[in-house]
């Protein structure tokens, strides 16, 4: 008797999209995604457990997908990074501070407003790099 073909991992319908991803996030992540999603040229995509905020090829910020995590990562120009680190509640990124990244916790609606100020700066920095056709990695 012929045996049924063996199923391999990766075949079939695959995983269903989690409700929070389908809805664009929840909590602070949802509020950030709604605001940033309206900016011209921005692409928001889940990557490695975080929402990745891109302008063209340039990643300019990340926020956790999980609602219980609150650390927003933002990539700024050297001048804006120095200015940001003088504010309380903003700190150098634990691994990528030398590349212009900072971290801040976003817990409340007031934090979202504050974060959007810095995210706009990061967006404009990425815009300048994108117009030059260069990568900000390095």
Image: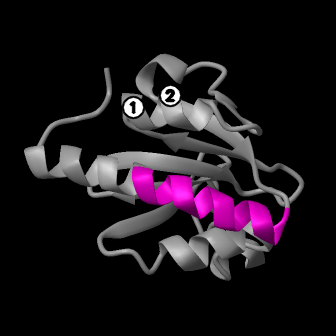
* Mark 1 residue element: helix
- Measured in 3D between alpha carbons, the distance from the residue under mark 2 to the one under mark 1, in whole angstroms, is 5 Å
In percent of width and height, residue 1 lies at 67, 62
Q: Quadrant of residue 79?
A: top left
Where does the magenta region start and end? 108-121
Q: Which mark is residue 27?
A: none
Nearer to the camera, 56 or 28: 28
Q: Residue at x 54, y 21 (%)?
A: 97
Q: Which mark is residue 82?
A: 2
Nearer to the camera, 1 or 135: 135
Estimate how packed mark 1 is, as few (under 14), some (14 to 19) or many (20 or more) residues with alpha carbons within 10 Å.
few
Q: Are marks 2 and 1 in contact (CB under 8 Å)?
A: yes
For label 1, the residue is 79
Nearer to the camera, 82 or 46: 82
Q: Residue at x 50, y 28 (%)?
A: 82
Residue 75 visible to an observer of this rendering = yes
The answer to whether residue 88 is left or right of residue 125 is: right
Q: Residue at x 31, y 75 (%)?
A: 40
Q: Quadrant of residue 26?
A: bottom right
In percent of width and height, residue 111 lies at 75, 60
Where, quadrant-wise, is the C terminus in this rendering? top left
Taking the magenta stretch, the answer to whether it contains residue 2 is no
Rendered position, 116 above or below 48: below
Rendered position, 124 above or below 80: below
In percent of width and height, residue 76 lies at 43, 39
Taking the magenta stretch, the answer to whether it contains residue 120 is yes
Q: Residue at x 68, y 48 (%)?
A: 49
Estimate how packed mark 2 is, as few (under 14), some (14 to 19) or many (20 or more) residues with alpha carbons within 10 Å.
some
Nearer to the camera, 60 or 78: 78
In percent of width and height, residue 103 lies at 66, 37
Residue 3 visible to an observer of this rendering = no
* Mark 2 residue element: helix
């Amino acid at each position: 008797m012929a045996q049924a073909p063996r199923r391999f991992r990766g075949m079939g319908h695959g995983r269903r999209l989690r409700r929070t991803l389908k809805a664009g996030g929840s909590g602070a992540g949802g509020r950030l995604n709604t605001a940033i999603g309206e900016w011209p040229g921005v692409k928001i995509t889940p990557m490695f457990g975080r929402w990745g905020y891109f302008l063209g090829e340039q990643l300019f910020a990340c926020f956790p997908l999980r609602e219980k995590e609150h650390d927003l990562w933002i990539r700024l120009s050297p001048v804006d990074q120095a200015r940001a680190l003088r504010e309380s509640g903003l700190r150098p990124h634990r691994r990528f501070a030398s590349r212009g990244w900072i971290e801040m916790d976003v817990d409340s609606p007031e934090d979202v407003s504050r974060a959007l100020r810095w995210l706009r700066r990061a967006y404009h920095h990425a815009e300048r790099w994108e117009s030059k056709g260069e990568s900000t990695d390095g």
